[in-house]
Image: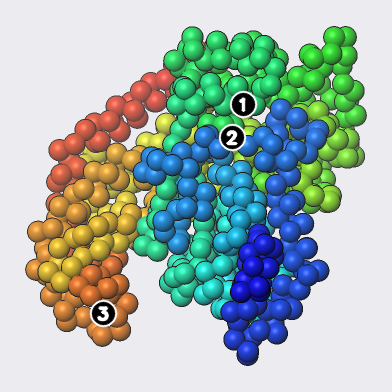
Amino acid sequence: MLEDLVKKAAGGLDGVAKELVKAASAKIQNKIQQAFALQKLEALKNKIDQIGKVKTFLNPESIVELNDIYYEKAIAFSDFSEKPISSFPERHVLVEGGPGQGKSLFLRYMCIKEAKGSRYIPIFIELRYLKYKKTLKDEIMEAVCDFGIQLDNDVFDYLAKSKKIMFILDGFDEIPGAYRNKAARDLENIARAYPDLKIIVSSRPDSGMGASFHFAKYKINYLTPKQQIAFIKHIYKQNGLARNVIRTLKESKFLSEVTNTPLLLNLYAITYNARQFNPDSLSEFYSIIFPTMLYRHDRLKLGYERERKSELTDSQMQRVFEVLSFISLNDNHTSFGISLFREYLAKSASVTRINENIEDRLIDDFTTITALVVPDGFESFSYAHKSIQEYFAATFISKQSEEKKIEFYQAIINDINKFRKWQNTLAFLETIDEISYVKNFSVPAKKKALCMDQSNKIKMDYSSVRDLLGGNSMIAIDDNGEILREYWDDTLYSAIHKGYSLFLRGQVISFLKTKSREIAEYISYCDINDYKEYQKSPGQYVIKIDVVIRRCNLQKLLSDIISSRLEETEFRQEIIHFERNAVAADNIIKEIFDL
């Protein structure tokens, strides 16, 4: 009894660690004691404490405590009314949100809140920093060692089954595309092997985790106008600054639709208070960020202009920043060490034809003046937010020759991994370089998706149906072959044209519902190993839709039906219309430049 009281009084990480040591078998208890020795437990606490120290756009020159500035009500889920933190009912959770919706800060906040409780030892891991040379389990074990906890397979197995460890994995979408599918499968294997291990993963939509049977998906809601006003009041302690921004939000419905994420709301508050500027589009909004961040400190101090060590003009600095954004994004680096930062800036300076050997001066200007790239540890730097990198990469692409644009777009159309890397950049290009985007990317991608021939007839083959559907899409079925639930894969087309995906998915499910007898027969007579893999509980099976279609020899019938149904939709005429308009606009531009 006394021991329990002492343990309860200790609470927090100390209490959880004591429970882990006490519950360990004699075989592994010594390893657990070593893993959570006092010195290592203190190192773990310090590591978690560092996770709670952040920089903000409002005060980029200082580090603040996340607990002091975090606004919990900025995160809400459409299918979970209360803020969940660790109270998600499922053990394995995918938190999904678009750029700037606050996924990373939410997970950091979750980690520091859990560290103060007595339920879990939270381990926060940024997936972008893993090397992906081994299995994801091994990579995670190495990352846990950075928290001061030394792991081997026995210790990992014990902790994962203990119900006392929470893995908080941030940024699945920032895993390089070539490794992402394998990482998703490895993550599912960990979830399958350790059903009691609490795992929270964050990701942007359509990034490769959508079809997971093992992770419950929670989508972050966009901020409502009422939440936006409350958020502004929270971040601005000076009522005057908050009042002016709130007034403009109330006056413009369009603006409140643009500033529907914490990131965009933060940036708008900064740009408005510096320039009293109201944008008409998201791309126009982003276009003002760089010049605003160059001068926002100076505008607060009459007669003061911050010295630029690079001695570059505004336009020169922005051109360098655009090239930097493109080449670093192309290399899958949102963060980089100082040597790589210098290398990127040397290339950027060369491309923009400015003075050589000014990399260190540019580093100082970009980090201390604009704060769009910020220090991230010792001699390491990162973009303040990935969407900033993506926007300025888009402006770089928009200024290239037509031949270069065509080369860029064709590479993306033919490679899903490249598409995922450039997905948000494409969204910006759709606005800032619309004609080229439609002509060289949107129309070709859609024609390829629907297998439109030269006469614009749709003739889908099964390979194309599978691409639209997603090779990892699955269905849950019962013994009678009746569909209980669908799990949809993230595909290129589910991101660039949701209408195609929604239509196709509906048609495929309707088709499969007419084939329940064939599906039930396949399940009944399939190989015993396949049967064991499919069965999730008595009378319930989860199987890839692609496997069902192929094993039941339904490829040609389904493809013919889909082609016929697509011919009856507006999709075909829409593509023809966009293509004609893009060509017409292009011809007008050629006439204008016909000297």
The residue type indicated by label 1 comes to His
Q: Earlier in the sequence, mark 2 or mark 3?
A: 2
Instruction: Kindly identify which residue carries mark 2.
Output: 71
| Gap in angstroms between the C-alphas marked 1 and 2 | 7 Å
Residue in the foreground of this view, choosing between 428 and 48: 48
Furthest-bottom residue in this view: 27
Looking at the image, how many numbered discs can be counted on the residues? 3
Q: Residues within 10 Å of mark 2 (few under 14, many from 20)?
A: some
Q: Secondary structure at mark 3?
A: helix
Reading the image, the residue beneath label 3 is 531
Compared to residue 146, the image places residue 458 above or below, namely above
First in sequence, mark 1 or 2: give its number. Answer: 2
Residue occupying the point 48% across, 63% down: 184
> Tag 2, which secondary structure?
loop
Tell me the crowding category of disc 1: few under 14, some 14 to 19, or many 20 or more residues within 10 angstroms, Cα based.
Answer: some
How far apart are the two marked residues, 3 and 1, measured between alpha carbons?
55 Å
Check if mark 1's residue and mark 2's residue have beta carbons within 8 Å. yes
Q: Quadrant of residue 26?
A: bottom right
- Viewed as shown, does residue 34 lie left or right of 216? right
**Residue 557 pos. (x, y %):** 14, 59
Q: Secondary structure at mark 1?
A: helix
Q: Of label 3 and label 1, which has the lower sequence position?
A: 1
Tag 3: amino acid: Tyr
Query: Residue 253, labelled with which disc?
Result: none
Position in image of residue 281 (x %, y %): 51, 20
Identify the residue position indicated by label 1 in the image: 234
Front label number (2 vs 3): 2
Q: CA distance from mark 2 to mark 3?
A: 48 Å
Q: Residue at x 88, y 9 (%)?
A: 303
Residue 411 in view here: no
